Amino acid sequence: MVVGADAYDHRKLPELERKVADQVNTGTYDLDANLALLRLYNVQPERIDLRLVASILIKAMMQLPKPDFALALHMIPERLQEEQPVAALIALTQHLEGARFQKYWEAVDACRDIVKAVPGYYEAVRAYILQAIQSTCQKVTRATLAQSLRADGETLDKLIQDKVASEGWSVNKTPGGGAIISLPKNDMNTIRPPQSAQGMRLNTMLPMLVPAAQ
């Protein structure tokens, strides 16, 4: 982590820029170094390399649902947020976070050359989409899953088979030739009945009552 006076030492700029390139080439990730570079770009705007800024944002998008993208965006001047490719990457992230997956896939087609420069990008995005679906749904049709992940055929079949074996998914065929996939229940996709005010008060009082009774 770059801290103190070093955080604004322009001599650190080449080193930090190399770190971003290394992350892209090796599939590693260093949020602290990336934020340090954006911080230096803020005080030396004439040195900004938009290609590296885009790489930082793409790597941050790959960490969803972590807030890394928002942290990086906070370090980028508003005027640059309106320029390409930054504006396009912001839109992609908003589509993902808003679960507008079809719109995401439509929009990413126009950014293909930008995002494909970072290996593992599509795999990370599909992992996030899959996590979002499992966190909000107990059932999903195969067609919806295919559309959300932009995956079909053998690729989708293998993913489903792997999830059936490893995570307890189950698949039920429908009369029309489709399939409905049942996903394991979890704290996020299960609706709990509202707790009464009396029950809430009791749960609050129990930690105080139990020690007193011992």
Image (tube, rainbow, N blue to C red):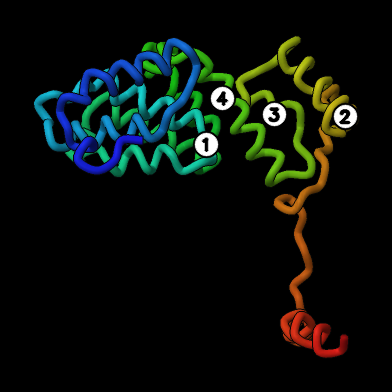
Q: Which label sits on residue 124?
A: 4
* Residue assigned mark 1: 64
Identity of the residue drawn at 22% across and 35% down: 6
Q: Earlier in the sequence, mark 4 or mark 2?
A: 4
Distance between the alpha carbons at the discs numbered 4 and 2: 25 Å
- Residue 69 occupies quadrant: top left
- Residue 132 occupies quadrant: top right
Q: Position of residue 84 (x, y in %)?
A: 25, 25
* Residue assigned mark 2: 171
**Callout 1: helix, strand or loop?**
loop
Distance between the alpha carbons at the discs numbered 2 and 1: 28 Å
Can you say which quadrant of the picture contains the N terminus? top left
Residue type at mark 1: give it: Leu
Identity of the residue drawn at 35% across and 19% down: 19
Residue type at mark 2: give it: Val
Vertical relation: 46 (above or below) 190: above
